[in-house]
């Protein structure tokens, strides 16, 4: 049987609202802390660095990012945990993997490390002017959870490089 006039109007109105919502949806580009969320496009721009300097990250580091942070974990005595979220309409959904890293003891850092001033993605506890613990938050966004985790791990490696620590 054919839908009634009332059902046809409802279906038409509902489909127009969905199209309007899908066309205006924009994914987040920055985390709550203000740090740029690592995406495939941002990673490609870092890998294809056109300047004469060496790129801050190599393809090897990207491919083995999760392995690198696991092997560095035993040397640097930190803990890390992933959180996952998905946002966006079904046809444009992105997974966000948030990597929380806690350094309970910063005495294992090399002496040349530039410990950051307090910022939103880096929180720390000080005792008599000496930093005792450090918390880093990094986010990766991709179409799959696995890729989002890899991007978050890559962003963590870049964050450590900003502090002056090279784990590769």
Image (cartoon, grey):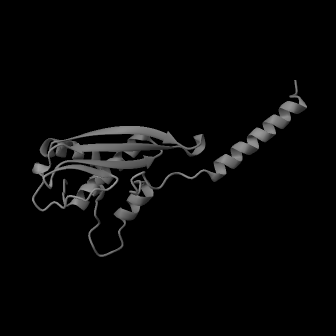
Q: Residue at x 53, y 51 (%)?
A: 27
Q: Residue at x 33, y 53 (%)?
A: 155
The answer to whether residue 48 is left or right of residue 168 is right
The answer to whether residue 122 is left or right of residue 32 is left
Residue 39: horizontal and vertical position, in percent?
Answer: 43, 54
Q: Residue at x 44, y 58 (%)?
A: 41
Q: Residue furthest right?
A: 5
Q: Residue furthest bottom?
A: 52
State whether residue 49 is above or below residue 133.
Answer: below
Viewer-proximal residue among 127 and 138: 127
Identify the image quadrant of the C terminus: bottom left
Q: Residue furthest top?
A: 1
Residue 67 appears in the figure: no
Residue 7: horizontal and vertical position, in percent?
Answer: 84, 31
Q: Residue at x 57, y 46 (%)?
A: 92
State whether residue 11 is above or below residue 103.
Answer: above
Residue 22 appears in the figure: yes
The answer to whether residue 31 is left or right of residue 112 is right
Residue 73: horizontal and vertical position, in percent?
Answer: 18, 43
Identify the image quadrant of the N terminus: top right
State whether residue 110 is above or below residue 49.
Answer: above
Total numbered circles: 0
Residue 11 found in image quarter: top right
Viewer-proximal residue among 30 and 16: 30
Residue 63: horizontal and vertical position, in percent?
Answer: 30, 50
State whether residue 43 is above or below residue 139.
Answer: below
């Amino acid at each position: 049987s054919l839908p009634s006039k009332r059902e046809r109007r409802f279906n038409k109105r509902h489909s127009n609202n969905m199209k309007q919502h899908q066309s205006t949806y924009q994914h987040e580009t920055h985390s709550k802390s203000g740090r740029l969320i690592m995406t495939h496009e941002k990673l490609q721009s870092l890998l294809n660095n056109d300047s004469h300097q060496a790129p801050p990250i190599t393809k090897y580091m990207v491919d083995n990012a999760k392995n690198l942070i696991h092997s560095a974990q035993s040397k640097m005595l930190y803990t890390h945990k992933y959180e996952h979220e998905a946002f966006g309409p079904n046809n444009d959904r992105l997974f966000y993997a948030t990597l929380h890293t806690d350094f309970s003891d910063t005495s294992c850092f090399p002496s040349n490390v530039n410990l950051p001033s307090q910022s939103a993605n880096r929180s720390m506890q000080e005792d008599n002017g000496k930093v005792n613990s450090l918390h880093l938050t990094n986010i990766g966004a991709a179409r799959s959870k696995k890729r989002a985790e890899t991007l978050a791990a890559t962003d963590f490696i870049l964050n450590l490089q900003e502090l002056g620590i090279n784990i590769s």
